[in-house]
C-alpha cells in the first residue's frame, strides 16, 4: 500500500498504527496546521442568526454576520469572545521566580455545535481533551478557562485533573445526547443538558474523525482501520468491519448508505445496515474532506486537487473538476451550486449537475476549515485568522472579520 500526502511523503504501511500516525502528523505540518503560528481549523455552526466557531488562537467566538457586514464595533448584539485554556498537568512547577502558568490556550480543531442555549466545544491539548458546554447568551468562563457555572454550563470530565483524549473531529447533538470521538479511542455519549456520561464505546484506536448519527445508529472510525456501527441508545456494537487503511474523512450518511474516504486513496460507499461495501473509487491521493450527498449524487473533494461527483447508488462518475491545489476543506451546496475551496484559498463555484465552473473567488489565504453555507452566503475561516462572508451568486466578499487582536 502506498499513501501520499500532497506529493511530499511516500510511505509503505499496512498494520503499524504508529507509522500511519507519524505520516499524518508530518502531513498536517506539510499542510501548515501544526506549530505555534497556526492552530486548529474549526468550521462554523449557526443559531438564530449568529455564527459560532473556534479560533486558531484558542478562543471561541460568536459573530453576527449582519453586524460584520455593517462594520460595527465588536462585540455588537449577540457577539462575544471567550478564551479557552487547557489546564496544565497536575503538580505544576513553582520556584523562587514564581509558578509556571497553570494553563495555556487550547487548540480547537473541532467545529462547535449549538443546541438550545448551549454551545458545545471540544479541545485538543497534547494527548488531553475536554468537552464544554457554554451558555451562548451569557458565556461565563474566567481568564483561566474555569467555568463560573452560569445556567446550564458544564465541563466533561468534571474534575479539572481528568481528561478524555484530545478531540479533533466535530461534535454531534441528536435530541438530548451529545456524541464525541476522542484520540483515546473512545466515542462518548453525554447528556447534552447536564454533561453526564450515558455510555462510552472503546474502538481500540485513535479517533480523529467526527461520528455520524442516523436512525439510532452511531457510525465511527479509528486509525486501526476499523469502522463501527454502534447503538445510540446504549453504545452496544451493531457491526464492525476492517478496512485496508485508516479512514481519512468523517463519514457522511444518506439513507442506508455511508460515504467516506481512506488513506489508501479510496472513496467508499458502505451499506449502513450491515457494513457491506457497495462500491469504491480510487483517486490519486487521500479523500480528506467529508463528502456531501444530495439525492443520488455524492460530491467529494480530494488531495489530488480534484472534486468528483458520483452516482451514489452505483459509484458511476458523473464529472470531475480540477482545482489549483489540494481540497482539504469540506465543500457545501448552495441551491444548484457546489462551492469548494482549495488549500491555497481559491474558491470555486461549480454547477452541481455538470461541474462547470461558474466563477472563482480568491480568498487570498490558505483554507483548511470546513465551509459553511446559509442561504446565498458561504462563510470561510482562513489561516490568516480572518473570517469571510462570500455571496456566491455574485462572487463578492461581503465582509471580513479578523480576530487576532481581540481579547
Image (cartoon, grey):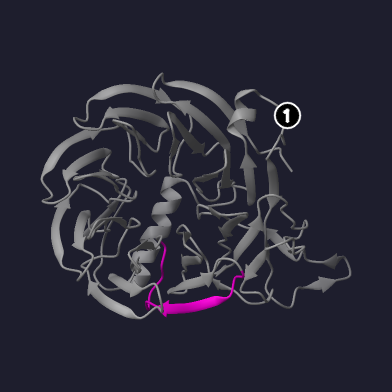
Query: In the displayed structure, does residue 207 sit left or right of residue 352?
Result: right
Instruction: Name the secondary structure under disc 1.
Output: loop
Q: Residue at x 50, y 77 (%)?
A: 198
Q: Residue placed farthest to the right in the image? A: 96
Instruction: Tell me the residue that label 1 is attached to.
Output: 73
| Residue 221 visible in the picture | no
On-image quarter of the N terminus:
bottom left
Residue drawn at (69%, 67%) of the image: 87
Residue drawn at (39%, 38%) of the image = 343
Rendering quarter of residue 150: bottom right
Dominant secondary structure (helix, strand or loop) of the stretch shown in magenta: loop
Magenta segment: 194-208
The quadrant in which residue 331 appears is top left
Q: Position of residue 375 (x, y in %)?
A: 43, 32
Other residues around mark 1 within 10 Å, as few (<14) / some (14–19) / many (≥20): few
Rendered residue at 46%/78% (across/down): 200
Q: Nearer the viewer, residue 78 or 287?
A: 78
Q: Is residue 340 above or below residue 185?
A: above
Image check: 116 left or right of 337?
A: right
Amino acid at each position: 500500500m502506498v499513501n501520499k500526502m500532497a506529493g511530499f511523503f511516500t510511505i509503505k504501511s499496512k498494520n503499524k498504527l504508529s507509522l500511519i500516525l507519524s505520516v499524518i502528523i508530518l502531513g498536517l505540518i506539510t499542510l501548515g496546521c501544526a506549530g505555534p503560528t497556526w492552530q486548529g481549523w474549526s468550521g462554523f455552526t449557526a443559531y438564530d442568526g449568529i455564527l459560532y466557531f473556534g479560533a486558531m488562537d484558542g478562543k471561541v467566538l460568536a459573530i453576527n454576520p449582519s453586524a460584520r457586514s455593517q462594520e460595527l464595533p465588536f462585540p455588537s448584539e449577540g457577539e462575544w469572545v471567550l478564551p479557552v485554556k487547557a489546564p496544565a498537568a497536575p503538580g505544576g512547577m513553582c520556584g523562587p521566580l514564581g509558578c509556571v502558568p497553570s494553563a495555556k490556550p487550547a487548540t480547537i480543531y473541532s467545529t462547535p455545535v449549538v443546541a438550545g442555549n448551549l454551545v458545545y466545544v471540544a479541545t485538543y491539548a497534547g494527548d488531553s481533551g475536554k468537552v464544554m458546554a457554554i451558555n451562548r447568551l451569557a458565556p461565563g468562563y474566567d481568564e483561566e478557562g474555569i467555568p463560573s457555572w452560569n445556567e446550564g454550563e458544564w465541563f466533561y470530565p468534571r474534575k479539572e485533573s481528568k481528561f478524555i483524549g484530545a478531540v479533533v473531529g466535530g461534535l454531534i447533538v441528536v435530541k438530548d445526547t451529545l456524541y464525541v470521538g476522542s484520540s483515546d479511542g473512545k466515542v462518548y455519549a453525554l447528556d447534552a443538558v447536564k454533561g453526564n456520561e450515558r455510555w462510552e464505546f472503546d474502538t481500540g484506536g485513535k479517533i480523529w474523525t467526527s461520528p455520524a448519527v442516523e436512525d439510532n445508529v452511531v457510525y465511527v472510525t479509528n486509525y486501526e482501520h476499523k469502522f463501527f456501527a454502534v447503538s445510540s441508545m446504549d453504545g452496544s456494537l451493531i457491526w464492525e468491519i476492517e478496512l485496508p487503511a485508516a479512514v481519512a474523512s468523517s463519514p457522511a450518511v444518506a439513507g442506508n448508505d455511508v460515504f467516506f474516504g481512506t488513506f489508501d486513496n479510496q472513496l467508499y460507499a458502505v451499506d449502513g445496515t450491515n457494513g457491506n461495501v457497495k462500491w469504491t473509487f480510487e483517486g490519486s491521493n487521500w479523500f480528506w474532506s467529508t463528502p456531501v450527498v444530495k439525492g443520488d449524487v455524492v460530491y467529494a473533494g480530494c488531495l489530488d486537487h480534484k472534486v468528483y461527483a458520483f452516482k451514489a447508488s452505483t459509484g458511476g462518475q458523473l464529472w470531475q473538476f480540477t482545482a489549483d491545489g489540494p481540497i482539504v476543506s469540506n465543500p457545501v451546496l448552495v441551491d444548484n451550486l457546489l462551492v469548494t475551496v482549495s488549500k491555497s484559498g481559491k474558491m470555486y463555484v461549480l454547477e452541481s449537475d455538470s461541474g462547470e465552473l461558474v466563477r472563482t473567488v480568491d480568498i487570498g489565504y490558505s483554507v483548511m476549515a470546513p465551509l459553511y453555507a446559509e442561504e446565498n452566503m458561504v462563510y470561510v475561516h482562513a489561516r490568516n485568522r480572518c473570517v469571510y462572508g462570500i455571496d456566491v451568486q455574485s462572487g463578492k466578499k461581503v465582509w471580513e472579520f479578523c480576530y487576532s487582536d481581540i481579547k
